[in-house]
Amino acid sequence: MDENNGNKRGQWSGRIGFILAATGSAIGLGNIWKFPYITGEYGGGSFVLVYLMCVVLVGLPLMIAELIIGRRAQCNPVGAFQKLHKKGSAWQLVGWLGVASGFVILSYYSIVAGWALAYIYKAIVGFSGTAEAIQGQFIELVVSPFDSIMWHTIFMILCIGIVIGGIQKGIERWSKILMPALFAILLGLMFYGLFATNGGAAALNFLFKPDFSKLTAEGILSALGHAFFTLSLGMGAMITYGSYMKKERNLLRSAITVSFLDTLIALMAGVAIFSLVFHYGMEPGQSVGLIFKTLPVLFAETGPWISVPFFILLSFAALTSGISLLEVVVSYFIDHRGWSRKVTTIVLGGFIYLFGLLSAVAAWTVPFRGKDQSFFDIFDFISTNYMLPIGGFLTCLYIAWVMKDKDRSEEFGSNGPLYKALKFVLRYVTPIALIAVILHGLELLPFMEY
Ligand code: PHE
């Protein structure tokens, strides 16, 4: 049952291998595409502060929880709950929910990742013409089924190609190449923003100076939901990656490192992007179009030296997240069905690809929550508002209230004050925060207007 279906499961080669792969999963479109635009929408500094609190109070504890479950069980999410609890117990449904979430999320994630790839090409050709014409290119891409499907196909082939290689020779090897490259590019773009434009100071101000009058309940709930998505939690990705970890690694240190790097990259991306936005006197609250509509207009001025690396960065980030989504699904079928990694990856990657076609065609809409919506929007909504928070909530209940204290503390590596603090947070803080997110998704929070 290892990478090549022998009798040993795959394992990371060492600490760096795990850190880069897990950080690769965490750092994705969420950091570079979504974080900057929601920060813009919800008013900057105060949102960032709340987001940081959510990472520490909700994200980090849950990441530790998932790693504990994965490493203890040495199994994919479904198998992990079966092994730790009882075979046939209802807890395995949490694992199933994770596998289903991986399937659904990758199917539409691949569409946005495809846009990132398409924009590498567009950036090389160069952005020119009026602002309307440049922004119009994005709409053309989204509404053209041919283009969307072509880039979706390329992205899925890349994911499948890497996951076929297995843990060390596929995921780890590529993370070791892509993550340092991503960091180097982002560092360059951030310095460019800070020192070569006139927007650096304004960007820092916007991101780090809280203005609490701008903070809304909606903003707080988005920060919470995002902390969750960006750390790849609630769907077993960290259970799966944790299951390939060696016993002697310290879980707390690993989880802190991954959460810290994920947050650092999101903030660096924010600085790079908002420096440009302010330099050209644009408004920060550009919503979803920030990366694909607003930035290209600015890139017409800066030229390809900035725009090409930017979209390469975005694509690398998407790719290392895409492979983790695929790995969750694939690992179940390898562990349980005994299928070979090659066949499993191709077959399941193929199914996800086909399912993704629904999201690739923007013109296909169905009624959902009172209006006609594209499959892309529906899957995005269902997975981020229901599937991940519910998966995270149940994982939290399991580890905090059901798992044996001995199993939990042994895996954590101590039962001292830090362990007690973690247990307290997982029992009383994280689940309550997640219930708020779930109720908000259902439009049932009493103090909100829907
Ligand atoms: N964390 C990724 C991002 O920020 C998305 C993701 C979610 C990846 C869940 C894997 C699992 O883009």
Image (tube, helix red, strand yellow):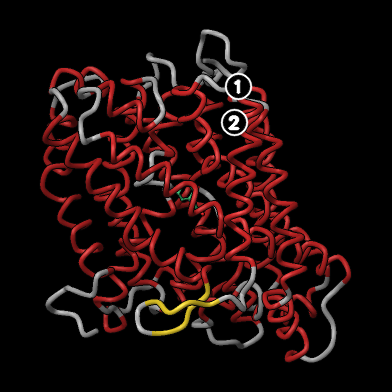
Depth check: 446 or 100 in front? 100
Q: Secondary structure at mark 1?
A: loop
Q: Secondary structure at mark 2?
A: helix
Horizontal relation, residue 263 to residue 407: left or right: right
Instruction: Give percent across and percent down for residue 75.
Output: 39, 23
Query: Is there any visible trace of residue 244 in the rendered image?
Result: no
In three-dimensional space, the C-alpha distance between marks 2 and 1, rounded to whole angstroms, equals: 6 Å
Crowding at mark 1 (Cα within 10 Å: few <14, some 14-19, many 20+):
some
Asked where in the image residue 92 lies, by quadrant, the reply is top left
Horizontal relation, residue 448 to residue 94: left or right: left
Instruction: Give percent across and percent down for residue 418.
Output: 18, 31
Q: Considering only vertical position in the picture, is 153 above or below 414? A: below
Q: Quadrant of the C terminus?
A: bottom left
Instruction: Give percent across and percent down for residue 245.
Output: 44, 21
Q: Are marks 2 and 1 in contact (CB under 8 Å)?
A: yes
Q: Which residue is mark 1?
A: 340
Instruction: Give percent across and percent down for residue 403.
Output: 16, 27
Q: Considering only vertical position in the picture, is 308 above or below 137? A: above
Q: Residue at x 21, y 36 (%)?
A: 90
Q: Residue at x 42, y 46 (%)?
A: 100
Q: Which residue is mark 2?
A: 344
